[in-house]
Structures are given as C-alpha cells and as structure tokens.
Image (cartoon, rainbow, N blue to C red):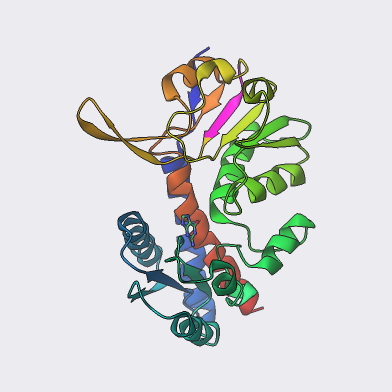
C-alpha cells in the first residue's frame, strides 16, 4: 500500500483563512480585534523560531500580536507580575508562555497563574480538568490539530483503536482525551511500555509524540493504519541538517493508509489552532 500524505500545511492554510474571516467580522461588526500575547523567557533558539512564526501568523490573520521577550534570569515574581498585567488587559484575549522555561522558574505555578479563559495553550489545570471531564475548555493546540486532520481524513473515529506514543502533558495526555472523546479505544504507550511493537501493531491510528528521531519503524504499522507524526527532530544526515519526525517516514508510508509528513504535517496545524483558540477566547470573552 502507498499511503495518502495528509497535507497539514494546506489544511492549516484553510484553517487560517477561516480564522481571518472571523477576525474581520469581529472587527467590522463589533469593533473588536482579538489580541494574542506571547511571552518568551531566555534565548532558546528553537523557541525563538516558534515565537517569531507565531507573531507573524497572528498579524497575517489580522489579529493584534504582542511579544514579551524577557531575560533568561528574570525572577519568577517579575514574570508573574507580567502575566497578571496581561490577565487584566482587555485588549489581550490569549496568553501563551513559551515552554520550556529556564530551570529556576516553576512551570506549573507560571502556567496556572494565566487566566484560564485566556489560556490558549489549554495547559492551565482548570482546562486540563474540563477536557478530562468532556466539558467546554481550551484545547491544547497540537493535539487539536491532530484531531482535526484525523476527523477530516476519516469522518467518524468511533470504535477505532488508537495508540498514542508519549505521555507528555502538552501532547500525549490531551491527545488521548480527545481521541477518547471521539469514541476511540485509546492506549497511551511510553518508554516503559512492554512489547511496544505489538501494541502499535494493533492500532488503526498511531500518534507518535516522543521526541526521538525515527523511532517507529514501518513494521510496527498495521496495513492501512493512519500515522500522525508529532515529532520535529533536527538530525545530521549525509553531512546535512535535516528535520525528521518520530516515525521512519519511508517504511511507515509503505504500510500506512495515510501519514503526516515532517515538515508540513502537524507543525503548521499547531499554529493555526493557536490562532483559532485565540478567536474562540475572544468570542467567549465578549459573549
Ligand atoms: N513548547 C513546545 N510546544 C509548545 C506549545 O504548544 N506551547 C507552549 N507554550 N510552549 C511550547
């Protein structure tokens, strides 16, 4: 079988167009411009790239973008004071604190100081609880993007066997909750899972989110399964710098029914969903 390539880049373009349409209606009909604030502490190169890209796309869909770049040694109290200021700013509807934070900062404390209604990452403990109990919440962007691609490809996911590889709070756990919400039978696999190959071979849907380059080989994939690759890993190959996912693309594509590429799969959907979450937060804030 030769897999259908799920084009996340093109899909993200249509999501951003819809977001831009909502933004122009909010402006014209209600005089409101959705605003997204991104906070970056320190100078991690990958984080700097993400933050720049988020800012650019926020402006492209017509929203207000505010960036706060803080020194790597910023005291926790100063960061919390900035978040408090953004929580109380009526022109800011979404707040994102780029992770990881420098070691001296308590990530849980910082994330939970964001107003849950402005938590466009969906990482606040209130949003995590709401998602886990199937209530209306802010949904983390990467898993939301994966779910949108799966729904678009399959229609209903009801009754499908899904295996999520990786148990992070950012992707693995919320991804599992979303798949459960769509009536999949869900397994979360991780570094201690026994017989991982056999677990993955049962799956109709495989979501790989472990951050280990090309760790899933094609012979773990059931014929016709759908493979969603969340990994973005930079490797050296043949003297060249290359981006690869968590699955070995060529061998997995030879067995899968559909697969997301890296780059051009999940990555662009994450930012598109961030923009969509900001519009959602703005609409909820304004009734
Ligand atoms: N770092 C890597 N992914 C993310 C994300 O989705 N949100 C935030 N805030 N930081 C990240």
Q: Residue furthest top?
A: 1
Q: Main secondary structure of the magenta part?
A: strand
* Highlighted magenta segment, given as a residue range: 224-228
* Residue 24, above or below 248: below
Residue at image location 73% in from the left, 29% down from the top: 161
Specify the quadrant of the image occupied by residue 118: bottom right
Residue at image location 61% in from the left, 62% down from the top: 122
Specify the quadrant of the image occupied by residue 39: bottom left
Q: Who is closer to the viewer here, 120 or 17?
A: 120
Residue 139, percent from left and from top: 63, 58
Count the numbered circles shown. Answer: 0
Residue at image location 58% in from the left, 73% down from the top: 109
Q: Residue furthest left?
A: 239
Horizontal relation, residue 111 to residue 43: left or right: right
* Residue 72, above or below 274: below
Residue 93, percent from left and from top: 53, 76
* Residue 68, above or below 233: below
Residue 285, percent from left and from top: 62, 78
Residue at image location 50% in from the left, 72% down from the top: 95
Residue 8, percent from left and from top: 46, 40
Would you say residue 149 sits in the magenta stretch? Answer: no
Q: Who is closer to the viewer here, 80 or 49?
A: 80
């Amino acid at each position: 079988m030769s897999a259908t390539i799920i084009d996340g880049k093109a899909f993200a373009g249509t999501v951003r167009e819809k977001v831009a349409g909502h933004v122009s209606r909010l402006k014209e009909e209600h005089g409101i411009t959705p605003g997204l604030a991104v906070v970056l502490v320190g100078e991690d190169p990958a984080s700097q790239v993400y933050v720049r890209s988020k800012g650019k796309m926020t402006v492209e869909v017509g929203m207000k973008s505010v960036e706060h770049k803080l020194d790597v040694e910023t005291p926790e109290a100063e960061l919390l004071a900035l978040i408090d200021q953004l929580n109380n700013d009526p022109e800011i509807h979404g707040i994102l604190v780029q992770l990881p934070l420098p070691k001296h900062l308590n990530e849980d404390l910082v994330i939970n100081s964001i107003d849950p209604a402005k938590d466009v990452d969906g990482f606040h403990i209130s949003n995590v609880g709401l998602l886990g109990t199937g209530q209306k919440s802010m949904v983390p962007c990467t898993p939301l993007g994966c779910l949108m691609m799966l729904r678009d490809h399959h229609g209903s996911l009801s009754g499908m066997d899904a295996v999520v590889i990786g148990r992070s709070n950012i992707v693995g756990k919320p991804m599992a909750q979303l798949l459960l919400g769509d009536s999949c039978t869900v397994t979360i696999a991780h570094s201690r899972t026994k017989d991982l190959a056999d677990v993955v071979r049962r799956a109709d849907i495989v979501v790989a989110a472990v951050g280990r380059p090309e760790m899933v080989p094609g012979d773990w994939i059931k014929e016709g399964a759908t493979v969603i690759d969340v990994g973005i890993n930079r490797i050296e190959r043949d003297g060249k710098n290359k981006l690869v996912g968590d699955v070995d693309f060529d061998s997995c594509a030879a067995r899968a029914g559909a697969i997301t590429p890296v780059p051009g799969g999940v990555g662009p959907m994450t930012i598109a969903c961030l923009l969509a979450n900001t519009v959602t937060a703005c609409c909820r804030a304004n009734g």
